[in-house]
Amino acid sequence: MRALIKHLYKDNALTFAIVITISITYLSLSKVSSIIPVLEIKNGDKYQHLLAYFVMMMSWLFVSQKLN
């Protein structure tokens, strides 16, 4: 199963990176407090952005490594 997922991601890495980028852009610009439960963590939105941008960076890094 892991090999299948890895194979699918390798073949469609650029598509996944574009979808991830569009999704993060949409979620960053829209008000999603009704979608994401509110956690009582100090500066919680900063941690959410950190995780989102880390995932986006890793997806584009994988695409750039695949193209070289």
Image: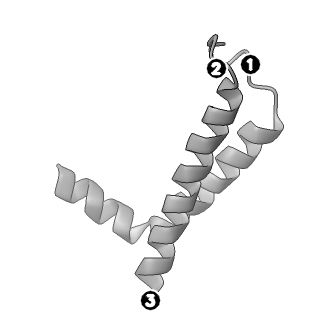
- Residue annotated with mark 1: 33
Residue type beneath disc 3: Asn
Q: Residue furthest front?
A: 42
In 3D space, how far apart are the residues under numbered discs 1 and 2 (Cα atoms)? 5 Å
Residue drawn at (70%, 25%) of the image: 43
Dot 2, how many residues are within 10 Å of its Cα: few (below 14), some (14-19), or many (20+)?
A: few
Which of the two labelled residues, at mark 3 and mark 2, occupies the earlier sequence position?
A: 2
Label 3, label 1: how far apart the Cα atoms are? 40 Å
Q: Position of residue 53 (x, y in %)?
A: 62, 50
Q: Residue at x 61, y 61 (%)?
A: 18
Residue 36: numbered disc: 2
Could you say where residue 22 lies in the image, as x and y percent from the top left?
69, 52
Tell me residue 29's x, y (percent).
Answer: 82, 40
Indicate the amino acid at tag 1. Answer: Ser
Q: On the image, numbered disc 3 is attached to which residue?
A: 68
Amino acid tagged 2: Ile
Q: Earlier in the sequence, mark 3 or mark 1?
A: 1
Dot 3 falls on a residue whose secondary structure is loop
Q: Which mark is residue 66?
A: none
Asked whether, in this view, residue 65 is left or right of residue 28, the answer is: left
* Residue 67 vertical placement versus 4 (above, below): below
At horizontal 70% and vertical 29% (from top left) the residue drawn is: 45
Disc 3 residue crowd, few under 14, some 14–19, many 20+, Cα 10 Å:
few
Of 50 and 1, nearer the camera is 50
